[in-house]
Amino acid sequence: MSASQPQLDAIAIFSHPDDAELSVAGTLLKLKQQGYRTAVIDMTRGEMGTRGTPEIRAAEAEAAATAMNLDLRLNLGLPDGHICLNDESRTAVVRLIRQYQPKLLLTTHWDDPHPDHANTARIVREAARLATMLRYDLEGGYAAVRMPAIMHSLYSRLVIPSFIVDVSDFVEAKMAAIKTHVSQFYDAESVEPETRISDASFLNQIEFRMRYFGSLIGVAAGEAYYVREALNVDDPLALLSQPMNIYS
């Protein structure tokens, strides 16, 4: 998967090489099935992680990209544990947005407890706006573009979802993509230090979370998102008459 790809429809921008898989893989798989061109951009190589090495994690990320049938996966190589909202990080994302002209960006929420995740959300929001400004980063070689829509994957239980994507048909494929990151998750034979995500129960928690969000809309599994901007709904009847199982 090279950087010489044509325009993309949806780009997921996350901090570490397994973040997109854990958060939005079901949605990316669904978008791909619907005929859209999808990509993942990793901000860092995950070199601060307790387990694995940057080289191992890069190979795992490529395997996950294949599992998600992505059109592109890139790594910006920013310093893990030190992602900051600054000109370097914003400009890097601006150039990606201008080069690939996505209609949609998926990223974390700024209320995420991990500083890298929270700062990635802020970088993406600012870069998406700056990418529309004609005179910003003139030396970058890319023209200004229309601002893409942004949807934030939810981690915090304090944030109410704006909507939930039905990913019932993609649970198995999502979990398979996650499990390509062998160094990071449970392996009974691993001799590396244990972490929260390497605990034997962690992957079950990810699936339970999908099942919970699915239950809120009356389906088997879902991924929840927050959008800060008002949604432009063309057909409210089609939107609101979808089968749901909500009790108030």
Image: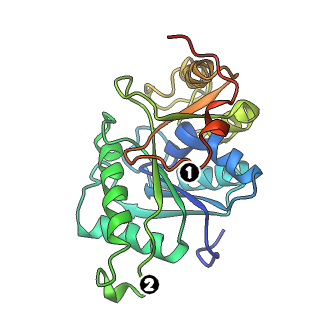
Depth check, mark 2 against mark 1: the one in front is: 2
User: Amino acid under label 2?
Assistant: Tyr
User: Amino acid under label 1?
Assistant: Ile
Percent across and percent down for residue 156 are 37, 28
Q: Looking at the image, is 219 positioned above or below residue 150?
A: above
User: Which of 101/234 is in front?
Assistant: 234
User: Element under label 1?
Assistant: helix
Q: Looking at the image, is 121 positioned above or below residue 111?
A: below
Q: Which mark is residue 56?
A: 1
User: Element under label 2?
Assistant: loop
Q: Report the Cα–Cα distance between label 2 and label 1.
A: 33 Å
Considering only order in the chain, which callout, 1 or 2, is on the residue closer to the N terminus? Answer: 1
Percent across and percent down for residue 225 are 49, 37
Q: Is residue 179 left or right of residue 200?
A: right
Percent across and percent down for residue 238 are 67, 38
Q: Is residue 179 visible?
A: no
Residue at 37% x, 73% y: name it: 132
Q: Is residue 211 left or right of residue 160?
A: right
What is the image's colouring? rainbow
**Residue 143 appears in which quarter of the rendering?**
bottom left
Query: Total of numbered circles in the picture?
Result: 2
Quadrant of image for the N terminus: bottom right
User: Which of 173/231 is in front?
Assistant: 231
Q: Is residue 6 visible?
A: yes
Give the residue at mark 2.
142
